[in-house]
Amino acid sequence: MRFYADLHIHSKYSRACSRDCDLEHLTWWAQRKGISLVGTGDFTHPAWYDHLRETLVPAEPGLFRLRPELDRDIARTLPPSCVGDVRFMLSVEISTIYKRDDRTRKVHHLIYMPSFDAAAEFNRRLGKIGNLGSDGRPILGLDSRDLLEITLESGEGSYLVPAHVWTPWFAVLGSKSGFDAIADCYADLADHVFAAETGLSSDPEMNWRVSGLDRYTLVSNSDAHSPPVLGREATVFDTDMDYFAVRRALETREGFGGTVEFFPEEGKYHSDGHRKCDVRFGPAETIAHNGLCPACGKPLTVGVLSRIQELADRELGYRPADAVDFRSLIPLPEIMSELLGVGPKSKKVLSEIATLTAAHGPELGILDDVPLDDLAASNTLLGEAIGRLRRGEVIRDAGYDGEYGVIRLFEPGELAKASGSVSLFDDDLFAPPPKPKPVAAPVVADAPVEPELFEEPALPEPVGTTLLDGLDPDQRAAAAVPSGPLLIIAGPGTGKTRTLTHRIAHLVTERGVPASQCLAITFTRRAAAELAERLETLVGPQAHDLTVATFHSLGVRILREQHARVGLSPRFGIADETVVQELRDEHGEMYKKELRARDLVDFDDLVEMPVELLAGDTSLIEHYRARWPWVSVDEYQDVDETQYRLLRLLCAADGNLTAIGDPDQAIYRFRGADVGFFLRFQEDFPGATRVQLGRNYRSGKHILAGAVQAITPTTLVEDRSLEPCGSHTEHALIGLHHAIDEQAEASFVARTIDQLLGGSSFHSLDTGRVAGDGTQGLSFNDFAVLYRTSTQARAVMEALTRAGVPFQKRSHDRLTDRPGVRALARELGLVGLHGSVVERVRQAAHGLDDEDSFTALELLMPLALRHGDDLAGFLSELALGAEVDTWDPRADRVSLLTLHASKGLEFPVVFLVGCEDGLLPMRWPGETLDQEAVNEERRLFFVGMTRAQQHLYLSHASSRLRQGTVRPATPSPFLSAIAPTVTDRIGDPVPRKRKPKQETLF
């Protein structure tokens, strides 16, 4: 059967879409237009997905229809000539914004699923990547290739079609952020893409000029944001009404009947131009002006026509041998609007179309099939208009830079002279002829201002034959110290980990130190994993003999080796906080005895017990000093007293201890860390070598200048300096923003992210909120929002959700704190479970058989997969504080995290919100801080500032909700240390007064 399909539409849950975009209205308008198959749109949105499940019932294979009673109600409101069957196919448009090859990519895709089960699986997977509830067309930080992979894995028969492939800003071949070939976008999975949507601004004839598109079936859809525009573009099929038959037709073109098109000039990105300056160009004019607007000198938005010409390898008019025909139509409301001289949504137009469709059937049939004599019998001018349309005799005024074009059938004044129309039409009823295309006088751009010269030492290229040849002079001086105690003061971004790993690798590969004699200690599992990974790259197979550990995992190793000395079995367990608390409640101060009776230790025991063990046995000290005569400690400024004692026991005063860190980044006093141990290193280890790293490869010069100014009043580093040595071509000033409250501050964050990306949606461009094209090569992963307290995240999360921006709040939650995980871990100890860790975790979850256990199963799978058959290692890592990892690693998201959690990380763009007295420094109302507490808060501010690579924004509000009360706020005193020469104030400090809507009489 031959039928029209419109498989790209949106629901009422998509931004800037009509509230009438529900299934009932879509069904009514589909019948009115003559469309038999409609995409549901937006099935990833939770509310729309539920509505689809409640309202649709299965029809033919892979398709759905309205519930019968709803269908009957709709049929009663339509003329008999329009009543027909409408089927729905599960569809959604996904927007992906990510970085590939150092360019920001923004690509929209259409996804189709054959069943609700497949859609649910797709939604589950995407739910780990972004917020599906923020917009019916979700914006995800996900590579297009990975989206295709998830699509293919979600259900047999699921497929992806690149959407409106030529749109400049958001398309696979777009001039602003796309690729030069569809296959490049989808990489190794490109063969699974067999169709492409041409979009409103191009037609198949334009696409035939690009031979690379011959392999794709070219489809068209309306991209409807309201039901009345259904079918403005559509695809024709001559197949069974069946999901799989439609898919097969797109793959093979058997049963594919071509497309119904807009005239491409009507699309809003057909020509080049600059809407704000009223400049519209064709490709040749754009080239003549070097792609710049002659009015303002800014880059023009390069439209579809120019982009196709850029990629074309065929002449205009070329037609491939297997090309399928298409027809260009003008929507019937626009034709009637021109005939009647009123708007296409006016009551007069709607009334006329209702009469026409009652007499002649659906709108597409009137435009394409109904005999002209029949139409002329109803309305002579309509018959003439449709005749001209079918012959292609139209007047075209092309769209550009987001402005729709205009397609007309009559010259101005022609209708008034038409026979029989004098009484119906007058010249003054018609819109005046479009004004001539503006021709602005060429503007001779001023010569570019020469940027301020700034010498940036480049990171040395490795030119020699040793590991140390790739280091800068300070790094090399530290890494090359042959032996003895060594203190390395490594400021932020100076290559701390690079220096430490190269030192260890140099010792092993070039100084003959056995890898088994090297111990490297850090504080977190992630830092230890990164250290081990880098060392494996530098050292090769010998890296497996290195010992890389956290303080607590080192303690576990020592206790397992010496278990008999402390009354434990070799397989002792580590009690979680719940068990410890239960024993404390039951046994009071004697709870430790009960722990030992159960062959358990608690988390603190992991360092305290090895210290007690070593302190009481000189021979044991000598044993471990002989085993690890080379010890390196990362982040030495963060050691607490127990960890300090352990290091003193493991290392003699003249031993080979390397301590690296930065006292100006000591921010964990609340955990017991004492920066004093760093400051007294040379007293503890007389004769120690001291090396300071001061070349920063991370941040721009203004960011570094401001950070050093901020820390200088209380710095713990003599002659503190950070020399900018990164590869930045531009150095942005630090942005200072004064907001009225935390909601306004959060809106500033969301708006600035949107601007730096060059717009994350069509809405951003159409509203004028974003004017640039985001050429900085940024993706969502490149943004971080830092705050002093976790409660500050709420306003930012709400603002990003409203903007449809994917984000993650990095809470560093431990897996054992999540519901069901502890119970599942206890179940793993039962007899009867067998197989790999993954299989055992699954068996345990099914044994418990409750909702929490299955949630815990999903959370534990990444960790279980890493441990293979090592159940003991799995349980040990779980007890040592393995963190929640519920996000798909393929996803890009804006990071939200506390200043403490940001330590050790870096981002191209950083927002530090809440720079107010009471938050920085942190102080509760009425509380007085001691000077060292204030100093540590200043160090925390310094840490936050130095996370930024390219852009840093510091913001504060006039008032903020704290402890349930809105309180006035004043800027942080730390801001006053930053010179105005390195900052740029952004935005108004208070909201502008709104003008009254109407003048008052008195």
Image (cartoon, grey):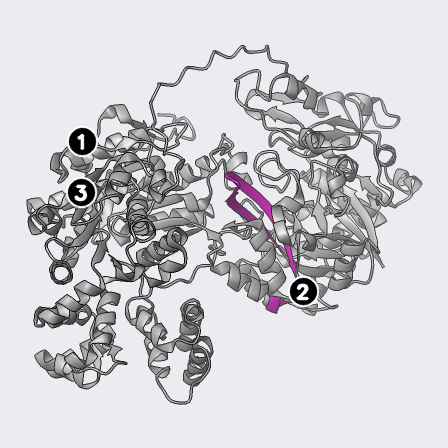
In the image, residue 112 lies in the stretch drawn in magenta: yes
> Residue 15 appears at what percent x and percent y?
53, 47
Identify the image quadrant of the N terminus: bottom right
What crowding class fits label 2: few (fewer than 14 Cα within 10 Å), some (14-19), or many (20 or more)?
Answer: many
Q: Earlier in the sequence, mark 2 or mark 1?
A: 2
What crowding class fits label 1: few (fewer than 14 Cα within 10 Å), some (14-19), or many (20 or more)?
Answer: few
Magenta span of residues: 92-118
3D distance between C-alphas at marks 2 and 1: 60 Å
Q: Earlier in the sequence, mark 2 or mark 3?
A: 2
Quarter residue 48 falls in: bottom right
In the image, is residue 584 above or below residue 504?
A: below
Looking at the picture, which amino acid does disc 3 mark?
Asp
Q: What residue is pinned by disc 2?
A: 114
Question: In the displayed structure, does residue 800 sit left or right of residue 684?
Answer: right
- SS for dot 2: loop
The residue mark sitting in front, 2 or 3, is 3
In the picture as drawn, the residue positioned furthest to the front comes out as: 512
Q: What residue is pinned by disc 3?
A: 664
The one of 298 and 664 positioned closer to us in this rendering: 664
Query: Is any atom of residue 681 visible in this view?
Result: yes
Question: In the displayed structure, does residue 51 sit left or right of residue 931?
Answer: right
In the image, is residue 246 above or below residue 356?
A: below
Looking at the picture, which amino acid does disc 1 mark?
Ser
Q: What residue is pinned by disc 1?
A: 976
